[in-house]
Amino acid sequence: MSFAEVLRFALRGLAANKLRSALTMLGILIGVAAVILLVAVGNGSAQAINERIEALGTNTVTVMSAGRGGSTGPALTEPVADALADPQLAPDVAAVSPVVSAAATLTFAGADHDVNQFVGTTASWFASSNTPVGSGSAFTADDEAQGRRVVVLGRTVAEELFPRADPVGQQVTVGGALFTVTGVLAPKSSTGFQDGNDTAVAPLAAVRQVVTGYGALTSILVRAKSPDRVDAVQAQVATILNQRLAVAAGATAPYRIQNASQLLATQTETADTFTTLLGAVAAISLLVGGIGITNIMLVTVTERTREIGIRKALGAPRRVILTQFLIEATLLSVLGGALGVAAALAGSSFSIVGVQPVIVPSSVGLALGVSIAIGLFFGGLPAARAARLRPIDALRYE
Amino acid sequence: MTRPVLEVRGLRKTYGTGEATVHALRGVSLLVERGDYVAVMGSSGSGKSTLMNILGALDGPGSGTYLLDGVDVSRLADRQLALARNRLIGFIFQAFNLIPRTSALANVELPLAYAGVRPRQRRERAMAALALVGLADRARHEPNQLSGGQQQRVAVARALVTEPALLLADEPTGNLDTRSTADVLEVFDQLSAAGRTIVLITHEPEVGDRAKRLIRLVDGRIVTDVRQSPLDRVPVGARPGRPGR
């Protein structure tokens, strides 16, 4: 009997029991899809959390003056800040934003509001500090170069000064000078006791001219090219600063560098926790899916022991029976598995309980591999056992 | 005289061990010539089903020898046993044992498929066998669309489609009503008239009466062995002028 013939037998066997074949495939489909989707949901929430942590600014380093207002020793100045943007000495630095800040009073049409942090900086600060503009627009590098008096207000300031009107395009008075409002910052979650929305941001040159004067910088915000390069950036920044500020070896540096290493540690910890969780979820769903597949395969073959007896009585060699049942098990497992992957891929395009699932490729391979292996084993083993029985025993099997 | 189709010597078979041992066969010797039509009768528990299963190579003989068409069946390996069941024996069960949800034609084709016959030839021979039992018009029906008698005739067609040396029937009319029984017995008569060797077991006297030779089995032993009509003659019930193949 040729293989093609046995294959036709197997197909006829599957077609003769459409409902049972469909149910078997459904069992495998659910097993595979459940594993892939659960892992994808876990992965998706892990990524969402990582993104949230990254939004807090894990990829920046802040350089601050250690002394009191630059009265002693060399201070952080604009040339120092410019020196940090050096592609040779500091290849991992993506952007450098010098920052001055002071308290100021903003006035508009008789209303006034005290701002704790009136920030003067460059255009790159918005991206580096993760402070997107909600309405209107940020100021540009050109505004900064021309020393134009423009300002972006924080949400609290905008609500205080312009309770009803749209602030964009209006002029507010700061320290006797008029600043044109170009935008309002998007609401920011407050960290600690400070209101993150009670701020205003204007070009460095304008702020120095009107509010702070031409002293030292308050701080320098340095953005790394990626979160895992932060430590490298910190080292590079330290090297350049030591050189520029002529710090002797062993002496206390006149500046200090803050980085987001604590946040990074949290992020890593979170990722580890999620990896463990994903592993557990995958293992449990594989176990459950596997038991389902085992169950339906055992029932299917046991139910057909009598049929195997009839076939043996008609002179079917063991090998032919075994091949037929293995082909049937293979087709069911592979088709069910493939449909399961398709279902999981389709399901992953929807967000599940607020999480956008992200498929982990290895979970697809694992789920498919384990399901097919289980299907083959538990479809093949009972069939092999039944094919080895004497026909009379197989026929009497209830 | 040609060699016998079936030759059994000193066949014994026991089930269970110790005090629960059941002696199903206690030394059965039997010789069946080509063309004979043998009915084995006996009450339930007489060992006739055990004998049938051994003759059909569905069960192994306990002790003793069993020569089927000159081949010692007890010495065959699994592969060769499958071959013997396929080529030498056509078995008809009391419970029909057709493959469910599979057409009558496909059921009859099955032994030919295992014998490696090409699909086209297979179909022709299966159709011929179905025509022989009078069911050519039911070829596309599945077992659950056929009456008991029709199912048993399909089973008969399946048993004889490979042209086996021996047709074995285990209470072929046990599950059938009177009319279906008559239909099936008529098929057997025709087959016997056509020169087939048939061994069947039954507990119905009217079935045993039609055979050429009647064997009675009691407690695992043959007690009577009566020739009811000559070996080379058409059996009593067969209608002349309608020979089989």
Image: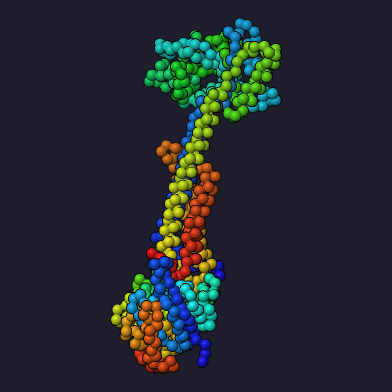
Residue B232 locus on image (x, y percent): 44, 93
Compared with residue A66, is residue B178 higher up or lower down, i.e. above or below?
below
Compared with residue A134, is residue A287 higher up or lower down, i.e. above or below?
below
B207 with respect to B127 (left or right): left
Residue drawn where x is 53% and y is 83% of the image: B70
- Where is residue A208, by image quadrant? top right
A83 with respect to B140 (left or right): right
- Where is residue A256, by image quadrant? top right
* Coloring applied to the structure: rainbow
A47 with respect to A255 (left or right): left
Residue A171 locus on image (x, y percent): 47, 16
- Where is residue B244, by image quadrant? bottom left
Q: Nearer the viewer, residue B124 or A314?
A: A314
User: What is the residue that sits farthest to the left in this orientation?
Assistant: B178
Examine the rendering and report whether any part of residue A207 can be seen: yes
User: What is the residue that sits farthest to the top in this orientation?
Assistant: A71
A257 with respect to A308 (left or right): right
Q: Which quarter of the figure is the C terminus of chain B placed in?
A: bottom left
Residue A386 locus on image (x, y percent): 47, 64
What is the count of numbered marks?
A: 0
Q: Nearer the viewer, residue B66 or A297?
A: B66
Q: Nearer the viewer, residue A177 or A120?
A: A120
